[in-house]
């Protein structure tokens, strides 16, 4: 061949290589890749599942299906190598397979050789789970759009989990706001998606718990779906836990124990995989620790009959002080081997660091964090605006990236791992926060929201949606009335909505974010409107002596009725309803009792609360009716005067609305939610509204300040008149009226002993001893009945007037 021919041949090869290159300006093009992964029965099922997961998730996002092959087809087609070194040794790979020998369980490496022939992405797992997590991490890193898959050619990673146990409770039961309607395919998809983000465990709920036996949404009976979920978990090598409450009345009765052993054994033998059983000490169930531990020893032996390696865990949940002391004493003395570990979750009234010190070191602690609820819960939204608490309620869609990361990191060092407490897909994003931090506690929050957005929403919307999730959390910061960012959040999501593809508009995670953005904005619009109406109504009442009492009441009533007859932002409300119906269609989320057959308003059905009053209209209209019934004008004016001067403590006095962060200057807050997210030492805000039932009390009684368990609720007054006598008026209500309350001054004067605060008008007045204010200062402390366990609530105060006599 002459020189000219050699040059032509060289140019042809260069042009051919350039045209066929898999490396583009955007990265390594994997659109036409193949997956080189061992298959066949000799390959562990989870490794085969990992390859199937990778192929199917790519196809869903790109409409391209990668073939799974057993040999490299040519030198140009990009290859995804997936497996363990042991399994890959059986087939010919583009390059020798090397995995560091010291990598721990579940670890993996991903290596990109973009210039290789063929271009290769090698995903190696230290074991079957490592292969699954390698495939999951690759899915999170790739940019997948219609017809195209790209990966940063410089991406290389070796990674191992920092936390051994990373899981989530997925209860197929009526009480949840969506799970009870999911079919087997939906459960596999969700369990798969959790595994993509590093989850390695799922907690199931048995057929008998504190739930109804049936749901109108069930596609399968409880036990049959439980079996299916156990099978799916085994395919994805997810540990199977069972949250198994001891529901019977008396486990000191041998007949009851015999019944429980048979009932539980019937479940144990049906499930193809069980790795652990967790029995809570209460809520539900409420059994003295001695018979409870005796039962669990027998149940642990029964469990091992069917699943020899399965473990038994328990928690002192809901134990009162006496039972907690008995439990800890017995545990330290006996240290039973049948018990594997202790669970720390809601209503465990020993703080986690102290619990770690109190139990033998042989027992690991598993966290059971409540990531699903926003109020009346383990980790409530700090200082949540009453308008949200009334409408969105306890179980709303609640992405809390900053809060959840702070809660995770605050107590990470004390625990072996976690399975979160979930009541539905409303907390979907929070599961991902915990899963990713469980893998690497130092993962920046912005990386979490971006990976979530890239994988579930799409790379073209990644940054907008990620910032939107952060904005939704900011929507819940501070007073809603002044939080103008709520409208900015909506505008940003409306921009995403306008450019979204038809497929994205049907994506349930996108729908959830839109629902929250529109819902929040609508509630703020109503709050502004109804606050202004109430102020105008109060202004009319202040002029009653000039206009006459009945005319003033009629004018005020007419103004308040505008909230019903002409509410603002009707288009936002209409779209909220549309999105609620769309979510029922896409993920069976039950946002309404009437429309979607939700089990209760309190269980996530916040569409039914969207029009709840946000001002004093119910109370004022009740008072108006009573005033109209009076015959005497002076008597009517006197009653109106009580309304307009409701918060007036008189000259030299002080008024606190303890449920309003802007009107509680004398409340001692303590360390606060950042340092004390479970409020063992900090006061917090609560609401007395439950199950969607609103009262006709003043709105200041709908919320309160409270302390938890045995901690006192404290108020501090300085700069009082040391020569004056003082009297207090206090309103007790809260959501736990059966729990009695006691008040002291300066820790030495009992203002009142334990009293029953459950009465229709919970206003009390007491004199303050002169000795308590002689130094110009006053410390008031409220205590609930000592010794109670349960939910820890009871020391709850709504309003305080400190009046100078």
Image (spheres, rainbow, N blue to C red):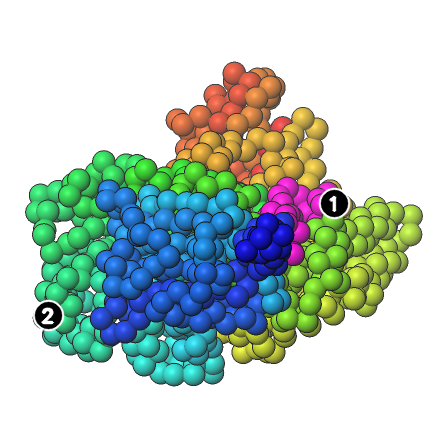
Numbered disc in front, either 1 or 2: 2
Instruction: Report the residue at 23% width, 55% height from top.
Output: 314
Which residue is identified by label 2?
305
Q: Can residue 723 be seen in this view?
A: yes
Instruction: Report the residue at 17% width, 53% height from top.
Output: 340
How far is mark 1 from mark 2, CA to CA? 60 Å
Q: Nearer the viewer, residue 456 or 784?
A: 456
Instruction: Report the residue at 74% width, 62% height from top.
Output: 499
Query: Residue 484 got which mark?
Result: 1
Q: Please give the range of residues in magenta.
A: 458-486
Indicate left or right for 252 with 425 as reference. left
- Mark 1 or mark 2, which has the lower sequence index? 2
Quadrant location of the C terminus in the rendered image:
top right
Residue 225 coordinates in the image, percent (x, y): 35, 78
| In magenta stretch: residue 462 | yes
* SS label for mark 2: helix
Q: In this view, does 777 lie above or below 488?
A: above
Residue 555 coordinates in the image, percent (x, y): 86, 58
Indicate left or right for 2 with 243 as reference. right
Q: Can residue 207 be seen in this view?
A: no
Residue that protrudes farthest toward the right in the picture: 546
Indicate left or right for 757 with 368 as reference. right
Residue 501 coordinates in the image, percent (x, y): 69, 67
């Amino acid at each position: 061949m002459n020189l000219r021919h050699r040059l032509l041949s060289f140019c042809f090869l260069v042009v051919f290589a350039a045209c066929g290159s898999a490396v583009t300006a955007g990265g390594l093009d994997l659109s036409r890749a193949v997956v080189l992964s061992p298959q066949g029965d000799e390959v562990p099922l989870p490794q085969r599942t990992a390859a199937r997961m990778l192929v199917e998730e790519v196809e869903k996002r790109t409409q391209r299906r990668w073939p799974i092959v057993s040999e490299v087809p040519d030198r140009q087609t990009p290859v995804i190598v997936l497996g363990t070194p042991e399994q890959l040794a059986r087939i010919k790979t583009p390059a020798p397979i090397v995995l560091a020998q010291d990598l721990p369980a579940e670890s993996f490496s991903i290596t990109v050789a973009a210039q290789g022939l063929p271009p290769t992405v090698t995903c190696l797992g230290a074991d079957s789970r490592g292969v699954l997590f390698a495939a999951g991490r690759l899915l999170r890193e790739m940019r997948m759009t219609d017809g195209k898959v790209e990966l940063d050619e410089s991406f290389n990673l070796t990674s191992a989990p920092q936390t051994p146990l990373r899981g989530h409770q997925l209860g197929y039961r009526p009480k949840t706001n969506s799970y009870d309607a999911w079919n087997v395919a939906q459960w596999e998809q969700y369990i798969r998606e959790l595994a993509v983000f590093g989850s390695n465990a799922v907690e199931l709920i048995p057929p008998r718990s504190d739930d109804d036996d049936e749901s109108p949404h069930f596609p399968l009976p409880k036990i049959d779906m439980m079996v299916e979920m156990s099978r799916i978990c085994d395919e994805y090598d997810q540990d199977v836990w069972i949250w198994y409450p001891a529901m019977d009345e008396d486990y000191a009765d041998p007949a009851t124990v015999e019944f429980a052993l048979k009932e539980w054994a019937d479940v144990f033998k049906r499930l193809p995989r069980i790795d652990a059983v967790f029995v809570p000490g209460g809520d539900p169930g409420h059994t003295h620790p001695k018979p409870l531990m005796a039962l669990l020893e027998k149940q642990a032996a029964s469990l091992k009959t069917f699943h020899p390696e399965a473990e038994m865990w328990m928690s002192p949940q809901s134990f009162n002080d006496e039972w907690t002391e008995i439990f800890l004493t017995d545990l330290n003395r006996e240290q039973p081997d049948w018990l594997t570990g202790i669970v720390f979750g809601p209503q465990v009234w020993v703080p986690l660091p102290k619990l770690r010190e109190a139990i033998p070191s042989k027992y690991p602690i598993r966290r059971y964090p409540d990531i699903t609820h926003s109020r009346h819960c383990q980790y409530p939204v700090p200082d949540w605006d009453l308008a949200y608490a009334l409408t969105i309620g306890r179980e709303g869609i609640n992405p809390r990236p900053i809060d959840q990361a702070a809660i995770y990191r605050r107590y990470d060092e004390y625990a072996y791992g976690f399975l979160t407490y979930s009541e539905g897909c409303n907390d979907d994003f929070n599961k991902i926060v915990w899963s990713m931090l469980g893998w690497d506690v130092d993962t920046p929050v912005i990386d979490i929201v971006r990976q979530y957005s890239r994988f579930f929403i799409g790379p073209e919307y990644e940054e907008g949606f990620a910032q939107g999730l952060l904005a939704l959390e900011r929507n819940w910061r501070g007073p809603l009335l002044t939080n103008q960012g709520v409208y900015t959040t909506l505008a940003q999501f409306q921009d995403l909505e306008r450019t979204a593809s038809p497929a994205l508009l049907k994506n349930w995670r996108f729908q959830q974010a839109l629902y929250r953005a529109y819902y929040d904005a609508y509630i703020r619009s109503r709050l502004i409107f109804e606050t202004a109406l109430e102020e105008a109504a109060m202004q009319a009442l202040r002029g009653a002596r000039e206009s006459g009492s009945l005319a003033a009441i009629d004018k005020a009533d007419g103004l308040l009725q505008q909230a019903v007859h002409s509410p603002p932002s009707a288009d936002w409300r209409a779209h909220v309803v549309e999105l609620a119906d769309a979510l029922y269609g896409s993920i069976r989320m039950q946002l309404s009792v009437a429309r979607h057959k939700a089990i209760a308003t309190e269980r996530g059905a916040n569409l039914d609360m969207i029009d709840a009053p946000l001002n004093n209209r119910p109370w004022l209209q009740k008072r108006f009716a009573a005033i109209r019934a009076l015959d005497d004008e002076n008597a009517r004016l006197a009653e109106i005067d009580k309304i307009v001067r409701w918060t007036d403590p008189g000259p030299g006095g002080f008024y606190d609305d303890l449920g309003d962060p802007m009107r509680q200057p004398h409340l001692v807050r303590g360390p606060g939610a950042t340092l004390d997210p479970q409020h063992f030492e900090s006061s917090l805000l609560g609401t007395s509204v439950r199950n969607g039932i609103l009262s006709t009390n003043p709105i200041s009684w709908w919320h309160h300040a409270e302390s938890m368990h045995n901690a006192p609720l404290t108020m501090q007054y300085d700069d009082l008149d040391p020569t004056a006598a003082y009297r207090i008026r206090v309103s007790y209500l809260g959501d736990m009226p059966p729990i009695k309350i006691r008040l002291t001054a300066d820790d030495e004067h009992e203002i009142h002993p334990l009293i029953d605060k459950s009465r229709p008008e919970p206003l009390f007045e007491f004199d303050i001893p002169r000795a308590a204010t002689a130094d110009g200062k006053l410390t008031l402390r409220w205590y609930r009945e000592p010794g109670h366990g349960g939910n820890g609530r009871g020391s709850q105060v709504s309003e305080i007037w400190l009046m100078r006599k």
